[in-house]
């Protein structure tokens, strides 16, 4: 869809209007000359769609109605208000469709540009990871944090710096989720550091993606809380492991019960046992533990 942005650039407004007017004039003249033989009214679609990228909705409707009058005027058929109305509706409708398409494309491009500027100028490290676990996007703060050889973090595996993020990026389709954790990372020179990570997963073209904000934490000033310590947890039963996996995938208690062929009360009991064993109090914290401790 990049051709939309290239064709309807603001710098091309006057040339587009000139070309559209020339096309309308040419179609009208040829239609007038061939009046006894064939009607060329359908060709008014092209100049209308061409100019629609720069016109207001009211102007598009007016242009469509004007072209419909020209088409009816030079038609070999007798004048018909019904046919005129349908032609105006068709011409204006196509123009409005193109106008909305261009407007949405412009809004998307402006939003992406604002997001890019915000990310690149952010003082905190921000990365996006693709389905292969490779860094798809990283700002300067992320490259400074990781001290990447060559200065480019893009295209490198996130597992080399933050293995927990690679584990959180699941290959199979699952509900998107947001969570945070504290974990140990490694710079490209081998130095370890402690980081608070806020991340979310999402789907892009049916492929899983992950976006994360990373902030380095001073080990002395802020010790790792109990949820993020790399302590060995009690072994889970097969049922508890399955419940943890389904919670991680975003299923509610009733859906878990249906999936496992259990009653909802049994699922609730299994969840309470999971909370007790992992030391958490909510499903969100359980997801966090699942990421940090590789429970699923």
Image (cartoon, rainbow, N blue to C red):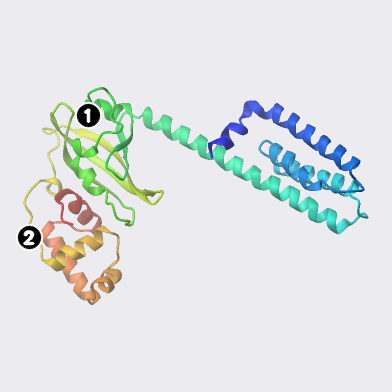
Of 98 and 214, which appears nearest the observer?
A: 98
Check residue 146 in the rendering and tell me which mark sits there, or answer none.
Answer: 1
Q: Earlier in the sequence, mark 2 or mark 1?
A: 1
For disc 2, the marked residue is 235
Marks 2/1: CA distance? Answer: 34 Å
Q: Is residue 47 above or below residue 172?
A: above
Of 277 and 109, which appears nearest the observer?
A: 109
| Residue 165: image location, x then y, percent | 23, 43
Q: Secondary structure at mark 2?
A: loop
Q: Judge left or right: residue 141 versus residue 22.
A: left
Q: Quadrant of the C terminus?
A: bottom left
**Snapshot quadrant of residue 224:** top left
| Residue 15: image location, x then y, percent | 70, 27
| Residue 87: image location, x then y, percent | 80, 52
| Residue in view at x 24 percent, y 63 percent | 246
Label 1: few (<14), some (14–19) or many (≥20) C-alpha neighbours in 10 Å: many
Q: Judge left or right: residue 131 versus residue 33.
A: left
| Residue in view at x 79 percent, y 50 percent | 88
**Snapshot quadrant of residue 78:** bottom right
| Residue in view at x 76 percent, y 53 percent | 89
Q: Secondary structure at mark 1?
A: helix
Check residue 87 in the rendering and tell me which mark sits there, or answer none.
Answer: none
């Amino acid at each position: 869809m990049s051709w939309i942005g290239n064709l309807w650039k603001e710098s091309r407004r006057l040339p587009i209007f000139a070309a559209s007017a020339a096309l309308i004039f040419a179609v009208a003249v040829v239609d007038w000359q061939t009046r006894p033989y064939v009607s060329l009214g359908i060709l008014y679609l092209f100049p209308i769609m061409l100019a629609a990228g720069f016109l207001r909705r009211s102007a598009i409707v007016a242009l469509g109605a004007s072209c419909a009058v020209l088409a009816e005027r030079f038609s070999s058929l007798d004048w018909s208000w019904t046919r005129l109305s349908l032609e105006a509706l068709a011409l204006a409708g196509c123009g409005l469709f193109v106008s909305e398409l261009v407007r949405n494309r412009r809004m998307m491009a402006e939003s992406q540009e604002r997001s890019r500027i915000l990310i690149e100028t952010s003082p905190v490290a921000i990365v996006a990871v693709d389905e292969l676990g490779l860094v798809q996007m990283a700002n300067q703060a992320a490259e400074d944090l990781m001290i990447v050889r060559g200065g480019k973090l893009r295209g490198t595996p996130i597992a080399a710096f933050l293995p927990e993020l690679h584990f959180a990026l699941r290959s199979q389709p699952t509900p998107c989720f947001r969570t945070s954790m504290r974990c140990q990372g490694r710079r490209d020179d081998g130095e370890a550091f402690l980081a608070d990570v806020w991340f979310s997963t999402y789907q892009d073209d049916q492929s899983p993606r992950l976006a994360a904000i990373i902030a380095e934490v001073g080990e002395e000033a802020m010790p790792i809380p109990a949820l993020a310590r790399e302590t060995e947890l009690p072994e889970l039963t097969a049922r508890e492991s399955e419940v943890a996996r389904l919670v991680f995938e975003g299923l509610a208690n009733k859906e878990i019960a249906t999936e496992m062929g259990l009653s909802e009360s049994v699922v609730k009991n299994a969840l309470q046992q999971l909370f007790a064993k992992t030391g958490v109090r909510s499903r969100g914290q359980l997801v966090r533990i699942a990421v940090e401790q590789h429970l699923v």
